[in-house]
Image: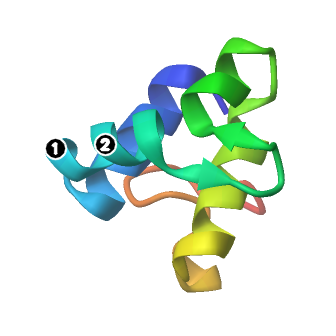
Amino acid sequence: MRLSEFQRACAEEFGADYARVLIRDHWLAAFGGTAQEALDSGAPARDVWEALCVELGVPPARRHGRGLIDPRE
């Protein structure tokens, strides 16, 4: 997952404004920091997206990111 795909998936799942807040401020236990900090430290965008989905209860059917191609296809 590219960074642009991560950003688009977040915006489409949570809304553009709230997505920016989540990425900047939401503490991800899996990374011991925010999504932005995880990305800045080199964590794969796919892993950060998955951690956000798990913590925020995004249904598994939507975890490939709305507007993105399902990676199983």
Q: Nearer the viewer, residue 37 or 51?
A: 37
The one of 22 and 59 positioned closer to us in this rendering: 22
Residue 27 percent across, percent down from the top left: 60, 50
Q: State which quarter of the image contains the C terminus.
A: bottom right
- Numbered label attached to residue 17: 1
Q: Name above or below for residue 18 compared with residue 25.
A: below
Residue pictured at 78% horizontal, 45% vertical: 47
Q: Which residue is mark 2?
A: 21
Q: Residue at x 52, y 37 (%)?
A: 6
Helix, strand or loop at disc 2? Answer: helix
| Residue at image point 69% right, 44% down | 48
Q: Is residue 68 above or below residue 34?
A: below
Residue type at mark 1: give it: Asp
Residue 59: x and y in percent read 55, 86
Report x, y in % for residue 31. Answer: 81, 43
When asked about the image quadrant of residue 24, the answer is top left
Indicate the quadrant where residue 60 lies. Answer: bottom right
> In the image shown, does 36 or 66 lie closer to the viewer?
36
Q: Nearer the viewer, mark 2 or mark 1?
A: 2
Looking at the picture, which amino acid does disc 2 mark? Answer: Val
- Which of the numbered marks, if any, corresponds to residue 34? none
Of residues 67 and 26, the one drawn nearer to the viewer in this rendering: 26
* Residue 46 x/y as whole percent: 72, 42
Could you classify mark 1 by the number of other residues whose Cα lies within 10 Å: few (under 14), some (14-19), or many (20 or more)? few
Q: Residues within 10 Å of mark 2 (few under 14, many from 20)?
A: few
Q: Is residue 21 above or below residue 67?
A: above
